[in-house]
Amino acid sequence: MSARWKAWRNAALMIVALVALWELVYLLVGESALASPLATLRYGLRMVTSESFGAHLYDTMRAFAIALFFSVVIGLAVGFWLGFDRLSGDALEPMIVAVYAIPKLTLYPILLLAFGLTLSAKVAFGVLHGVIPIILFTLSAVHNTKPILIKTGRVLKLTRFQMVRWILFPAATPEIFTGLRVGFALTLIGSLLAEMFASQRGLGYLLMNGIGLHNVELIMAVTLVIIVFAASVSTLLLYVDHRLHRRG
């Protein structure tokens, strides 16, 4: 049996086990607290085929895509800068870690004052969650690059940009990609949290609307859509991550 077949088999067994556990918990707690898998699937199919769902999905994906773009660009730029400049990295890394430890929800009122109830606030909150892990993983990846590669670049008198482009980035790609994978998940969380607390559209808004109306089927259906999307992309990213580490 090939390793790929085993992976698919294990994934299928895990999904079956989770659905069975879901059904068991539903039978224990009842309809007032949880919807059954079948009821959730039926409601979810009606929801995603409705006219209004497309607008909510588009709002969430637009905010998330923009936030992820800025998280990656800023995270890589700052991470390479701090990794390449040891003095700046040693001085600023503890500050970045300290900022990362702050509960992000405490900063959301400040973002609302700065950006208002707009797309910018959702993007900023998503970036706030996703950018720091990318910075830290990139910084660590540059620090772990073999010294002989750095010395070779200096002997060849490469500029900083050339050093990053031809030496640091290829050598640090596996660890950087791990940071991107973590940044993806946290950026999505930040974008959804922003919609939950101050938005009139989006999946996060639908989720909070379902909670306010105590619509269990809506809550479960929206949660299922988010989980399926996040799990699908995360599985693909994890596969690429493992390939990069094996190749490295």
Image: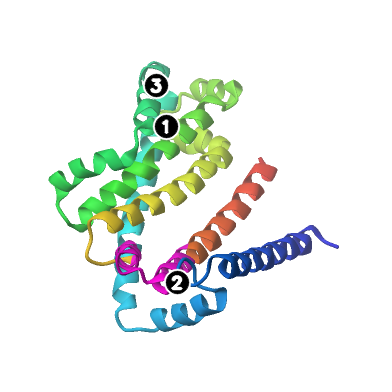
Q: Main secondary structure of the magenta part?
A: helix
Q: Residue at x 26, y 54 (%)?
A: 197
Q: Mark 3 points at which residue?
A: 94
Circle 3 sits in a helix, a strand or a loop, which is it? helix
Q: Name the residue under label 2.
A: 221
| Callout in the foreground (3, 2) | 2
User: Which label's residue is closer to the chain start, 3 or 2?
Assistant: 3
Q: Residue at x 49, y 41 (%)?
A: 179
Q: Residue at x 13, y 45 (%)?
A: 113
Q: In this view, does 18 lie to the left or right of 30?
A: right
Q: Quadrant of the N terminus?
A: bottom right
Compare residues 73 and 105 and report the one nearer the observer: 105
Q: Which amino acid does label 2 sit on?
A: Ala
Vertical placement of residue 211 versus 237, above or below = below
Q: In which quarter of the image is residue 136?
A: top left
Circle 1 sits in a helix, a strand or a loop, which is it? helix
Report, in whole angstroms, how far the alpha carbon at label 2 lies from the one at label 1.
41 Å
Q: Which residue is drawn at 53% across and 32% down?
A: 141
Residue 54 image point, x, y percent: 33, 76
Q: Residue 80 carries which label?
A: 1
User: Which label's residue is closer to the chain start, 2 or 1?
Assistant: 1
Report, in whole angstroms, how far the alpha carbon at label 3 lies from the one at label 1.
16 Å
- The residue segment tinted magenta is 203-226
Vertical placement of residue 14 versus 103, above or below = below
Residue 236 image point, x, y percent: 58, 58
Label 3: few (<14), some (14–19) or many (≥20) C-alpha neighbours in 10 Å: few
Q: Is residue 202 left or right of residue 134?
A: left
Report, in whole angstroms, how far the alpha carbon at label 3 lies from the one at label 2.
41 Å
Compare residues 38 and 242 and report the one nearer the observer: 38
